[in-house]
Every structure is written in C-alpha cells, then in structure tokens.
Image (spheres, rainbow, N blue to C red):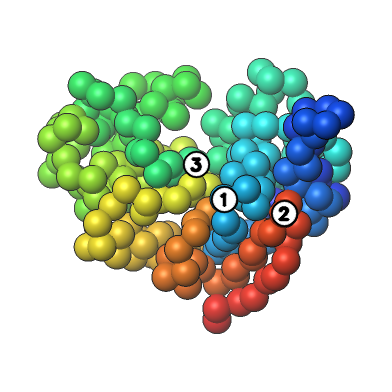
Amino acid sequence: MNPVIALSEITKVYGTGETTVHALRGIDLTVERGDYLAIMGTSGSGKSTLMNIIGALDNATEGHYELDGISIDTLDEAALSIVRNRKIGFIFQSFNLIPRTSALSNVELPLLYRGVPRRERVTRATAALESVGLGDRMHHEPTELSGGQQQRVAVARALVAEPSLLLADEPTGNLDSRSTADVLDLMDQMHHDGRTIVMITHEDDVADRADRVITLVDGEISSEWRNR
C-alpha cells in the first residue's frame, strides 16, 4: 500500500539573484497511513511552505511529491483542485467558515463541490457534525457558536468527504485552553479511528499529542522523534 505522503528532495526557492530565498532545502518525508505527525519550527523555518506543498496549494521548485500514490508534480491546476477535494481535509487556525451560513451547509461544501446529491450531502454532513458533538447545533451560524464549536465544525467539514489526509494548520491557535483540549481530544479520537493526520504547530504541548514530531530549521529537517 502506498504511503499517504512521499516527499523526495523537495526544495522551494522564492525570488532570484540577491532576493533569492531558499524556503525548503531537500526535504525527504514519508507519512504512512494512520500516522499522526506534528511539524514544528519557528517563524521562517519553512513549516508553512511545507504545509502548502503537502496540501497541494503550492508547487515545489524541485523534487517529487506523491499523495496517496498520485504524482502531484505532473498535475495541472484543475487536476490539483480535484485531488485537494478528494484526498485532503483542511483544518485551519481561522476556521474559514462561511458566515451567515449554517454549520450544516458549511460541512456540506466539500460534497457540493464533488457533485454529491443533496440528500446524501445532508445525511453525511449531519453524521459528521454528530461525530464531533454538534448534532444539536447544526442549524446555527458561525457567529452563534463559540470558537471551539467553530473549530469542531471545521473538523467535521474536513472529515465529511473521507479524505486520505487531514492537514491541520495551527488548529488550536485561536482557542482558549479548554477548547484547545477539546479539539486535541477530538483529533486523538480521529487518529485512533485510523485517520492520517499532519499538524503544523509551534506549541510543544500540542505537538506532544502526535505520535511523531519533526522540527524544521532553515528549510531542513533538523530533528525527528517519536512521542510513543
């Protein structure tokens, strides 16, 4: 079975001449199905660039990337959009929910883009919201939900299309300590259910929830360890 993520000699260079910035320098990384990986690093370490490449939101300058057996380097933007929708569930720090739209409709969106019929969309979105403990809040808009509840809606939206990879970018960055614990407990449960998770974070206590942690320094993997 193919790994979910296989990066080989990934480099990313911005600019030319005196303005050249080497954001990533030869990254090799494999994430197997069911892994829970945290990527850490200070500002400017390259972790956001790496997240964008893993999420097929940006292209590497050099190197090779396979996502669930698909060679990402060879795809045009239309094909990349399809792969992102089918293979990756995104969880962002800022939730990225559509305002004045119910939690249910927000969670339906990935299925809507895929052309799933309405009845099936509603059934699957309802089940996803119930799985994160928001079955009784599905008709509330984002402004009627707490920060922790909004992030749980975002988690349900990431889960609803059954993606190969959950990619979380600082998922607790805008949450208080109680909501942070709730969301991390939810991610623990998703991992125990067999989900593959890659999480970007700068917080040690958040990274401690992952099975495996890598640290980036100046665009290179400087260290790697396992928590369990």
Check disc 3 and report the residue beneath it: 89
Task: Please identify the quarter of the rendering in which residue 206 is found.
Answer: bottom left
Q: Quadrant where the C terminus lies?
A: bottom right
Between tags 2 and 3, which lies in front? Answer: 2
- Left/right of residue 60 with respect to residue 117 in the rendered view: right
Q: Earlier in the sequence, mark 1 or mark 3?
A: 1
Residue occupying image coordinates x 23% and y 45%:
147
- Which residue position holds label 2? 218
Q: Residues within 10 Å of mark 3 (few under 14, many from 20)?
A: many
Q: Residues within 10 Å of mark 1 (few under 14, many from 20)?
A: few
Residue extending farthest to the front is: 18
Q: How many marks?
A: 3
Which residue: 21% across, 21% down?
Answer: 100
Q: CA distance from mark 1 to mark 3?
A: 24 Å
Q: Which residue is found at the position 83% from the left and 27% from the top?
A: 16
Q: Nearer the viewer, residue 39 or 44?
A: 44
Q: Position of residue 201 (x, y in %)?
A: 49, 57
The residues bearing labels 2 and 3 have C-alpha atoms spaced at a distance of 27 Å
* Residue 3 appears in view: no
